[in-house]
């Protein structure tokens, strides 16, 4: 059997990737759209993270049995076609919870406390030249008593809430099915009341552009907005306009509707601002998280061939 990993470098090259059984294992650092069909035509198993697997590509893979997604989200795979063809599709839920929550809180802390600006003040020599023992501008505030709104209260959202509570924040949550132990409110109320908003939703037809221009306008002018979910959940142009026009205070973004974002992206107009933290879709990617992801992919593949139902998303 042939196992093909179409974009191995999305998981990095700093740990060893080995299969649990004898098979031909072909790894490509990345695969361009026009290369997909040729590279998977003999594959029995596909490992994939970001590369899109469309019907016209998958139809060439006559031996394909299962696709193992190196992520929780699987919107890059034509699930309807896989179901029609009887191709198994497995994802990896929960592997990046700690990593994404950690980066979410780190973004908030950095933006709230202006740490890059204070560090630059020292590194650039201004502190030494000032002759003054301390500097407390730009102004920063304590998190104690702030309201943190969490859009999408799954595993990651709950982990963020735990950390935010430890910092003294009050938590609001937006989720389809309210649950006990957290104050669940409408999205509109959450945006209106929150000092910090972080987004942790999967991308779907229902969540695409969920946070649009009208909803962004509901936020406080002192609000910090963080998106570590999917870029298309937010109207990116409206978000950047709100920041430019001081309708919100700061943004941290790790995900984009097109990755990497192009020269015409609205983020180019704000990427150098001190109240902006843009990162290259790395929040999920601690070493521990990536190793857990690959181990789970191997487990999913083994379970499939053992006839077990494990993390199947096409059923």
Image (tube, rainbow, N blue to C red):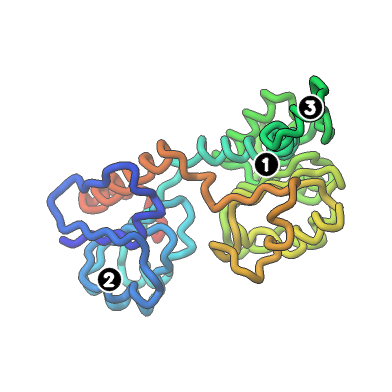
Dot 2 crowding, Cα within 10 Å, few <14, some 14–19, many 20+: some
Q: Quadrant of residue 83?
A: bottom left
Q: Which residue is mark 1?
A: 178
**What residue is drawn where x is 31% and y is 65%?**
87
The mark nearer the N terminus, 3 or 2, is: 2
Q: Position of residue 35 (x, y in %)?
A: 33, 74
Say if 80 sits above or below 287 in the image: below
Position of the N terminus by quadrant: bottom left
Q: Which residue is mark 2?
A: 39
Task: Check whether the beta carbons of the residues at disc 3 and disc 1 lie within 8 A of each other.
Answer: no
Q: CA distance from mark 3 to mark 2?
A: 53 Å
Q: Which residue is mark 3?
A: 142
Dot 1 crowding, Cα within 10 Å, few <14, some 14–19, many 20+: few
Q: Nearer the viewer, residue 312 or 202?
A: 202
Residue extending furthest toward the left: 22
The mark nearer the N terminus, 3 or 1, is: 3
Depth check, mark 3 against mark 1: the one in front is 3
Q: Nearer the viewer, residue 103 or 72?
A: 103
Answer whether residue 112 is visible to the viewer in this image: yes
**What residue is drawn where x is 54% and y is 62%?**
260
Position of the C terminus by quadrant: bottom left
**Dot 2 lies on which element?**
helix
Q: Nearer the viewer, residue 307 or 130?
A: 130
The mark nearer the N terminus, 2 or 1, is: 2
Q: Quadrant of residue 14?
A: top left
Say if 144 sits above or below 286 in the image: above
Q: CA distance from mark 3 to mark 1?
A: 29 Å
Answer whether residue 172 is visible to the viewer in this image: no
**What residue is drawn where x is 82% and y is 49%?**
248
Say if 262 sits above or below 72 in the image: below
Q: Position of residue 100 (x, y in %)?
A: 55, 41
């Amino acid at each position: 059997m042939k196992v093909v990993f179409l974009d191995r470098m999305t998981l990095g090259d700093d740990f060893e990737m080995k299969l649990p059984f004898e098979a031909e294992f072909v790894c490509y650092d990345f695969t361009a759209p026009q290369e997909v069909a040729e590279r998977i035509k003999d594959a029995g198993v596909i490992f994939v993270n970001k590369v899109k697997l469309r019907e016209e590509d998958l139809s060439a893979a006559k031996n394909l049995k299962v696709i193992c997604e190196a992520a929780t989200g699987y919107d890059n795979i034509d699930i309807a076609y896989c179901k029609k063809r009887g191709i198994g599709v497995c994802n990896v839920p929960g592997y990046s919870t700690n990593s994404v929550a950690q980066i979410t809180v780190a973004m908030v802390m950095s933006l709230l406390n202006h740490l890059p600006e204070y560090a630059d003040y020292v590194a650039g020599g201004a502190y030494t030249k000032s002759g003054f023992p301390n500097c407390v501008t730009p102004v920063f505030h304590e998190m104690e008593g702030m309201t943190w709104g969490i859009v999408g209260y799954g595993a990651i959202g709950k982990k963020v809430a735990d950390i935010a509570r430890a910092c003294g924040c009050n938590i609001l949550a937006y989720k389809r099915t309210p649950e006990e132990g957290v104050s669940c409110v409408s999205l509109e109320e959450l945006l209106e009341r929150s000092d910090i908003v972080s987004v942790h939703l999967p991308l779907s037809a229902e969540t695409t552009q969920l946070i649009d221009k009208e909803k962004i306008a509901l936020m406080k002018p002192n609000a910090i907005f963080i998106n570590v979910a999917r870029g298309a959940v937010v109207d990116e142009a409206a978000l950047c306009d709100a920041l430019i026009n001081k309708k919100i205070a700061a943004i941290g973004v790790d995900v984009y509707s097109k990755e990497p974002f192009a020269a015409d992206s609205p983020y180019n107009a704000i990427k150098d601002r001190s109240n902006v933290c843009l990162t290259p879709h790395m929040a999920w990617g601690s070493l521990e998280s990536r190793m857990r992801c690959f181990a789970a992919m191997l487990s999913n593949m083994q379970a499939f061939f053992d006839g077990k139902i494990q993390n199947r998303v096409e059923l």
